[in-house]
Image (tube, grey):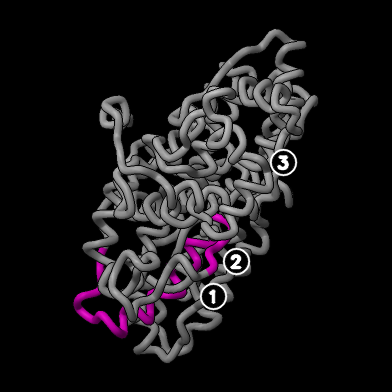
Amino acid sequence: MHNRILVIFIILAVAPFAWPVPSSAQVEVIPGNSLRGAALFREKGCVECHAFRGAGARVGPDLAQPNERTHTPMQLATALWNHGPRMWREQENRRLGATLNSAEAADLFAYFYSLSYFTAPGDAARGSRVFEEKACATCHEKTGEVLHRSAGSLSSRPSGPPVSSWTRVEDPLWWAERMWNHSGPVYSTLSQTGIGWPKFSTGDMVDLFAYLRALPEAASQSAIFQPGDPEQGRITFERRCESCHSFGSRTAERKIDLLKMPGPDLLTGYVAAMWNHATLMLSRAGSEFPILGPGEMSNLVAYLFAQRYFNEEGSPERGALVFESKNCVVCHELRRRQTGAPDLRLSTERYSPITISAAVWQHGRAMLKATERENLSWPEFKASEMSDLIAYLNSRLISRIADQARRIPKRR
């Protein structure tokens, strides 16, 4: 995989679970199940104030519409924190009193991002042109007639299955897996004919999938994705990818650090990156080119996504200044006995946008009352400050895992 083969901007519908990280024994909560998140969005009363993709109330913003303030999980968690006092007042007016634990917050984050970054519609007409311009039509029948506009020396008979026989075109992750495994034969065929390897932009791939879904043979006009298991994806990464790629300082040096590389904003961008990178992998790996088994692409993407997208790197040093300047130190250290605030070093979970959001829902009202008793204003953050604060809090964790944390189930 390449510097573009990274994390997709779609929170996959994966089972929430936690695994230890090298720096402490605290568990790390990662994105949950988007289907459960959809149910929670209704059950927890979110629809009383917020719409999602046009469905729901209009008191708050539509959470499925990405904007500059909530484009990333860190930004969303920051907005939720800053919005807390207003949200609690609105809940009191509407007699809502729901809370969220970390697993439920993970499910909601999965719901928000799985849909909001997967809705690029694409243009079927442009996709039809892409199909021809990128030489797909040289090997695959399009509408019952063999096309050879760029085939040149190819025989008059297409070498690949006709488009009418393609299945599951509504699932880009399945297609990413199929295209990756199919790249070897395509590379061999094109090398013999002198045709260059077709490269796709994210827009090309979005339009191509729109075209394929619009064909009469297609079973669905809408895009979907399948669940992936990040823990299984970690195993796939270690077996297939880790010889060349790393995640920060967690693996050996002189590898491509995926945490430092930009990733695509859409799932289809990931599919394009996989395909574009295949020739480099084929030339380097030869017969050792990794063929992915059924579901391995989905699992791998889930792991890459969790590693990258939900772990924005902050500065513990700057976070220490935020901890003091925002008066967190007053309630959580200097006047802990008087305020009843917890020792943040003793959390059983590593801090993240998910756990911060859960804390707002579980303890926000009590925190607000404590700040009022201490004559302190409710602290508001920028996303960068929240990222730094989380880095600082994690740097101070005292290693511990409670029995409850050990029993977090791998729900599927």
CA distance separating discs 3 and 2: 41 Å
Q: Which residue is mark 2?
A: 204
Query: Hey, what amino acid is under mark 1?
Result: Lys
Q: Which residue is mark 1?
A: 134
156 w.r.t. 175: above or below:
below
Q: In the visual, does 335 lie left or right of 250?
A: right
Quarter assignment of residue 318: bottom right
Q: Are there few (<14), some (14-19), or many (20+) residues within 10 Å of tag 2?
A: many
Quarter assignment of residue 158: bottom left
59 w.r.t. 30: above or below:
above
Give the mark nearest the N terminus, 2 or 1: 1
Q: Secondary structure at mark 2?
A: helix
Residue span colored magenta? 262-291
Tell me which residue sits at (55%, 19%) in the image. Answer: 99
176 w.r.t. 382: above or below:
below
Q: Secondary structure at mark 1?
A: loop
Q: Secondary structure at mark 3?
A: loop
